[in-house]
Amino acid sequence: MVILKSFWLDFVDLIFPRCCEACNKSLLGNEEVICTVCRMTLPRIEKNGVYAEDIQYRFVTIPEVLSTQSFLLFTKRGKVQKLLHGLKYRGNREIGLLLGFMFGQELQEEGRLPSVELIVSVPLHKRKMAKRGYNQSDLLAEGLSRSTGIPWSATALVRNKFTETQTGKSKQERQDNVAGVFAADQGLNCKSVIVIDDVLTTGATLSACVETLKTAGCTEFHILTIAVAQH
């Protein structure tokens, strides 16, 4: 039966080839979503590298943010951009689950996983949620939860106001754009949380999330993003 199943999968791949979402090469055998080579070679943010140090300063004015970590380096027309574009605009939800899972695995293996009670995803406004059909940050949070065992919530935060895209805005414009946008579940019963999003740029959106969660009694925050934009 196992041999027959393997033969059938090979036959299906021959007729309808599955391709890596990062490099477009055919997936082989048990590979899913991202090929083995790309999984190994995606540009990681080195623990003590220049980007890791820069990331730490994005939230220096919020003492409750105890750590900030990003998984991959986002460059224009690079593999990471292609993956996140597939996640956000081509409906490939599996990319989000896989990237969140991979990030969690590597944080654990390297002893860098924060000890928290809850993972909180950055919410979308209901209008954008209805248009896209899902929130990419929810998928990242779910994947991270699967690999770490930390529970996650899609309802700890809500986005009450529809805002323009942050793309192309200055740091101050981004801060103004998300001011008063979020609301927290006041029944939230936890002190330490991870807040996760897809790409870290100025940190304005994540800072607004942290400030809002503070009103619900959260006191310790760890920021995780799948990517950080190259400067």
Image (tube, grey):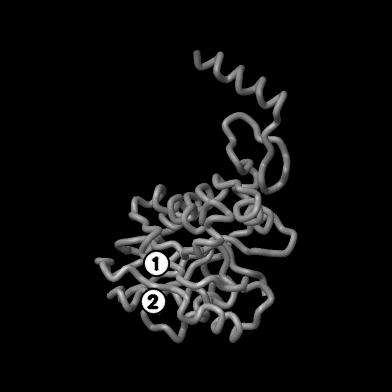
Q: Which residue is mark 1?
A: 157
- Which quarter of the picture shows residue 71? bottom right
Q: Which mark is residue 186?
A: none
Q: Position of residue 68 (x, y in %)?
A: 47, 71
Q: Position of residue 225 (x, y in %)?
A: 51, 64
Secondary element at image label 2: helix
Q: Is residue 1 above or below residue 210?
A: above
Q: Is residue 149 above or below residue 13?
A: below
Q: Which residue is mark 2?
A: 212
**What is the three-letter code of the residue carrying label 2?**
Thr
Give me the residue at 50% from left, 65% from top: 125
Q: Is residue 122 left or right of residue 16?
A: left
Residue 6 visible from this viewpoint: yes
Q: Is residue 76 above or below residue 178?
A: above
Badge 1: how crowded within 10 Å, few (<14), some, or many (20+)? many
Nearer-N-terminus badge (2/1): 1
Secondary element at image label 1: strand
Q: Position of residue 74 (x, y in %)?
A: 65, 64
Q: Is residue 129 above or below residue 19?
A: below
Q: Is residue 24 left or right of residue 9?
A: right
Q: Nearer the viewer, residue 35 or 11?
A: 11
Give me the residue at 45% from left, 71% from top: 160
- Give yes or no for contact between labels 2 and 1 (Cβ–Cβ under 8 Å): yes
Q: How many marks?
A: 2
In which quadrant will I find the C terminus?
bottom right
Q: Position of residue 45 (x, y in %)?
A: 57, 64
Q: Nearer the viewer, residue 96 or 116?
A: 96
Q: What separation in Å lies between label 2 and label 1 (alpha carbons)?
A: 8 Å
